[in-house]
Image (cartoon, rainbow, N blue to C red):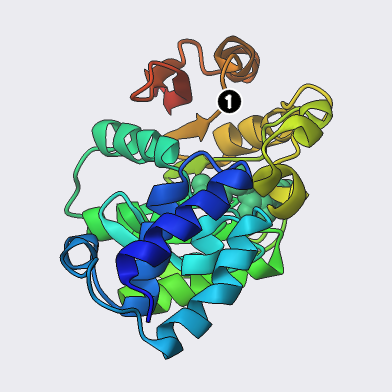
Amino acid sequence: MITVGEVLERTTRFLKSRGIDTPRLDTELLLCKHMGVDRLHLYLSLDQPLGDAELAAMRPDVSRRGSREPLYWILGERGFHAIELHTPVGVLVPRPDTETLVEAALAVIPRSEEPVYIADVGCGTGAIGLALAVARPEVRLFATDVSPAAIAATKENVRRLGLERRVAVLLGDLLSPIPPHRPVDWVLSNPPYIPSGELDGLQPEVSQHEPRLALDGGADGLDVYRRLIPQGLARARQGVLVELGMGQADAVASIFRQHGLASPRRWSDLGGVERVVGGPISP
Ligand SMILES: C[S@@+](CC[C@H](N)C(=O)[O-])C[C@H]1O[C@@H](n2cnc3c(N)ncnc32)[C@H](O)[C@@H]1O
């Protein structure tokens, strides 16, 4: 018989040997998944034996994590803002930095008694738009993506959150799948923004597993902004907000200015990195 504490120590050592930065936390979360407990109950169970069934079920997950598959693909869900999202294999795992875009949107979009129409372009799991739809009952959401896997993930999250009546999930490029006669008040997006040449140097979870379509922003990382910002400013009745990578705020602000948003605003994430640019369109 092996105890939960022994499995925790051994698995942590194994994941550390595979170069993982947070081996103990990852092991704790994998144990929680297989024991069906939260972390507090995990700590209270360290002296207890881990059942054969749990141990057998956990082994393939540890091996997947050892080969640097993203932790939240293995766990199958992740908390984001105030919601829990299904995070299936093949779809970019939402990052805590992206909560900056949600907070900026909540700060800049006025509360309303009337429906507010939001487009979340490149929705992935649906993180941005669904967090807003849960926070604001007046939100009506168009979630678009070119990846069928992302569309399926967002649809599943819409179902889990019971938001079917307020969300349309649409496959296609940028804003094009939203019927032209439908109003759009705000365009929000966390598009792919990593320069192509930097992708291979990123950690294996990103470079070897997460979809290139979600990451690759072309030679300088700005390809999607050059198409999305003019489309967004032409279509949105109220404003446009986009997430960006470290060091891209000046270039993205300049694209906004070129297309008519005279004084784009900027928001920083908790690490002080300028993470969101855009704002309301002046009347
Ligand atoms: C960085 S991920 C963001 C996912 C999600 N919004 C989030 O923040 O977690 C970018 C997403 O944009 C999608 N995408 C890439 N090019 C696109 C395009 N031309 N039109 C629509 N979606 C696109 C990708 O499939 C991916 O899901």
The 10 Å Cα crowd at callout 1, few under 14, some 14 to 19, many 20 or more, is many
Residue 105 in the image: state x and y as whole percent.
Answer: 34, 37
User: Which sits in the foreground, 7 or 99?
Assistant: 7
Residue plotted at (67% across, 30% down): 225
Q: Is residue 79 visible?
A: yes
- Quarter where residue 207 is shown: top right
- Amino acid found under the numbered disc labelled 1: Gly
Residue plotted at (23% across, 54% down): 135
| Residue 144 against residue 264 in the figure, above or below | below
Q: Quadrant of the N terminus?
A: bottom left
Residue plotted at (70% across, 34% down): 202
Say whether residue 265 is left or right of residue 107: right
| Residue 246 against residue 230 in the figure, above or below | above
Residue 96 in the image: state x and y as whole percent.
Answer: 40, 41
Residue tagged 1? 245
Residue 83 in the image: state x and y as whole percent.
Answer: 30, 60
Q: Quadrant of the C terminus?
A: top left
Residue 22 in the image: state x and y as whole percent.
Answer: 46, 43
* Name of the residue lying farthest toward the front: 1
Say whether residue 256 is left or right of residue 105: right
